[in-house]
Structure formats: structure tokens, C-alpha cells
Image (cartoon, rainbow, N blue to C red):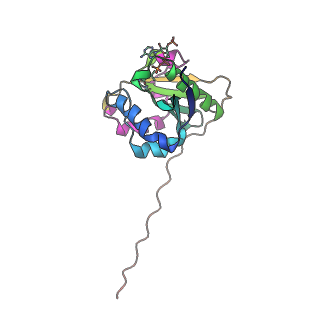
Amino acid sequence: MPTDLLRPAIIRDVPRISEIVNSHAQLGKMLFKSFAQLYEDLRDFAVYERDGEVVGCVGVSIIWADMAEVRSLAVNSDYMGQGIGKKLVQWSIDETRRLGIRRLMSLTYEQTFFEKLGFAVVEKDTLPLKVWSDCVRCPKRDGCDEIAMVHELYDVPHITAPEAIPTPRGVSIPVLEHIED
Ligand SMILES: CC(C)(COP(=O)(O)OP(=O)(O)OC[C@H]1O[C@@H](n2cnc3c(N)ncnc32)[C@H](O)[C@@H]1OP(=O)(O)O)[C@@H](O)C(=O)NCCC(=O)NCCS
């Protein structure tokens, strides 16, 4: 019997997460992640281990008070179809609930997979603008064909999410007076 473990990611998992995510990114199935992005976002991630080897990963990123996003969901191709993706998404739903966030979204090509996990297709323009911050790094940004899906956690109370306020103006750098030697 294989020994399976789903646990929060730690720093030594990053090379393996990169390998799994980017093997699918090369096939256009998801966004490429650099080591810098993975280190920065590592606290969002969980990994799935089989017999001590990381074979899948997922991240949950907070978008706004009432919305989180499933990011970088990937299972090593040798291990697909064994229920690992489902367990990783279930972890991301539990994590969203733990955070007190009512909706979890995904931008995906895997509509049937996510439907089986309680996600429903929504119009992209119903999502907060902040969702699209990653698009600058996406080669398909001018012709996005991903499907937007949302899982609503009905047991998490609604929250009155504040409106996004305009970014405050930057502080201007004072110009030093010219000093004669
Ligand atoms: C999508 C992905 C995470 C699914 O992981 P997985 O471990 O293969 O999926 P699971 O075995 O947990 O499947 C769960 C259920 O979804 C179904 N399913 C999985 N992939 C599916 C697909 N591509 N199309 C239709 N159904 C699918 C399974 O048959 C299973 O159904 P069941 O519960 O009725 O038996 C995996 O295929 C993957 O890493 N794909 C490449 C990267 C990617 O597309 N990531 C998603 C980015 S949003």
C-alpha cells in the first residue's frame, strides 16, 4: 500500500513544484511559475506526497474579502486519474473555509473536473478586477480562453467586502538643492 500525505509546502518542495507545474505550463495548460514566484507564494501552497515523493500541488491565493482563487493546481502526469487532484482541491476548499472566505474561484480548462467538485461556470466580468493581475504574464492575455468557475461555501457567512479604493498617489522624492563644493 502506498503511503500518501497531503501537507503544507515547505521550502525544499519548490524545485519539485516547479517541475510539476511547468511541465503542464509547457503544454499550455496553466501559467508558468518562476522560482521567485514560488518562493514568494509558498505559504499559499499544499503538496501531495506519495511514498515520500511530491506528486501534486495546489495554491490558494486571497483575492478579496469574499474571494480566493485556486492557483497552480497540478498532478504529475504519471499520477493523474487517481483522485489526487480532487484531494488537492478539497484541501483548497477547506483552506478557504478556514480563512472565512465564502467563494473560491478557478480559471481553468478543466470544466468537468471542477464541476464534480461543486464549482459552477460564471461570467468572467462578474469577477473582481484583481483576478486579472496575473494576465500580464500570460501569453494568451489578448485571447483568454479559460473558463471562470466559482465554488460557493454556503456555510461561510457573507461578509460586506469593502470596495477597492483607488491606489494612493506615490510619495514624491524630494529633490536635493544643488550644493556648491
Ligand atoms: C486537472 C488535474 C489537476 C486533475 O487531477 P487528477 O488527479 O488527474 O484528477 P482526479 O483523479 O482527482 O479526478 C477527480 C474526478 O474528476 C474527473 N476528471 C479528472 N480530470 C478530468 C478531465 N480532464 N476531464 C473530465 N473529468 C476529469 C475524474 O474522472 C474524477 O471523476 P470521479 O470523481 O467521478 O471518479 C490534473 O489532470 C492536472 O494536473 N492537469 C494538468 C494541469 C491542469 O490543467 N491544472 C488545472 C489548472 S486550473
Numbered range of the magenta stretch: 113-141
Judged left or right of residue 109, residue 92 is right
157 and 116: which is toward the camera: 116
Given residues 110 and 14, the one toward you in this image is 14
Q: Quadrant of residue 117?
A: top right
Q: Residue at x 66, y 29 (%)?
A: 158
Identify the residue at horizontal 38%, vertical 42% (top origin).
34
Residue at 68%, 29% (x, y): give it.
157
Could you say where residue 19 lies in the image, as x and y percent from the top left?
38, 35
Any magenta on residue 2? Answer: no
Location of residue 31 in the rendering, given as x and y in whole percent from the top left corner = 38, 33
Q: Is residue 139 magenta?
A: yes
Residue 80: % across, % down: 44, 20
Residue 27: % across, % down: 32, 27
Q: Residue furthest front?
A: 1
Residue 9 can be seen in this image: yes
Q: Work out which quarter of the rendered image holds the N terminus and state it.
A: top right
The residue closer to the viewer here, 99 or 38, is 38
Taking depth in this image into account, of 40 and 107 the one nearest to the observer is: 40
Name the quarter where the C terminus is drawn. bottom left
Query: Is residue 71 visible in the rendered structure shown here?
Result: no
Counting every numbered tag in the picture gives 0
Q: Say if 163 sits above or below 176 in the image.
A: above
Q: Which residue in the rendered view is the most extreme toward the bottom?
A: 181
